[in-house]
Amino acid sequence: MQPANKSPRPWRPAKNQFKRQSGIGLIEILVAAAVLSIGILGIVVLQVKTIADNNSALTRTQASIAAYSMFDIMRSDRANALTGAYNATVTVGNCPNAASTLADTQLRNWCLGFDGDNPPAGYSATNPPPGTLLGGLAALGSGTKSTIACSPTGPAVSASNCSITVTFNDSKATGGKAAQSLTYWTQL
């Protein structure tokens, strides 16, 4: 008799039952390369969209800075702002000419992005060189338009609600528009 835990005959694999793979197949390499290239392409597309959206965020920030800088200018010349001297529409590339009033000069400088009498080095109104540091509306690019409106206005007004609407090109952003408008409000 044989013990219960002993098999009647030992198990042995049949000859050539297990063959070892001797190399990587060409199809496996092609599939791996295709999966890797699709992943890298996805990362590149994501990076391009991220850069476009970051530029949009930068433009929105510049619009906010420009609007609030004009609000500060209006606060410093509150008497003229309350009479409606700053109520105007200005467009970069077609800035108003300097006039005899402080409000007109401030609007022109805000539109140009610098003191109209002291342009940055190398600046030309028709062809500003790349890298010219401009502020105000000019930082948002040519064609940017802004409308300033205060209400009520007049010589006897002691407080006025003012808005600045900045319209700029945001078409490069994901879902952006060629004429994106942002409106800011304050009370003088």
Image (cartoon, helix red, strand yellow):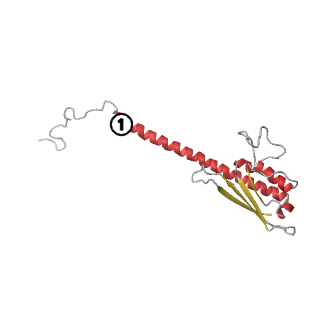
Q: Quadrant of residue 27?
A: top left
Side (left or right) of 7 relative to 36: left
Q: State whether residue 151 is above or below residue 42.
A: below
| Above or below for 159 versus 124 | below
Quadrant in which the C terminus is drawn: bottom right
Percent of width and height locating residue 53? 60, 49
User: Residue 170: percent from the left, percent from the top?
Assistant: 63, 51
Q: Which amino acid does label 1 sit on?
A: Glu
Residue shown at 85%/61% (left/top)? 80
* Residue depicted at 19% across the width and 43% down the height: 5
Query: Residue 147: x percent and y percent?
Result: 74, 59
* Residue 116 in the image, given as x and y percentages of width and height: 82, 46
Is residue 96 left or right of 3 when viewed as pictured? right
Residue at the farthest left position: 1
Number of on-image labels? 1
* Residue located at (78% from left, 58% from top): 71
Closer-to-camera residue (27/115): 115
* Residue at which label 1 appears: 28
Q: In which quarter of the image is residue 15?
A: top left
Front residue of this view, candidates 7 and 183: 183
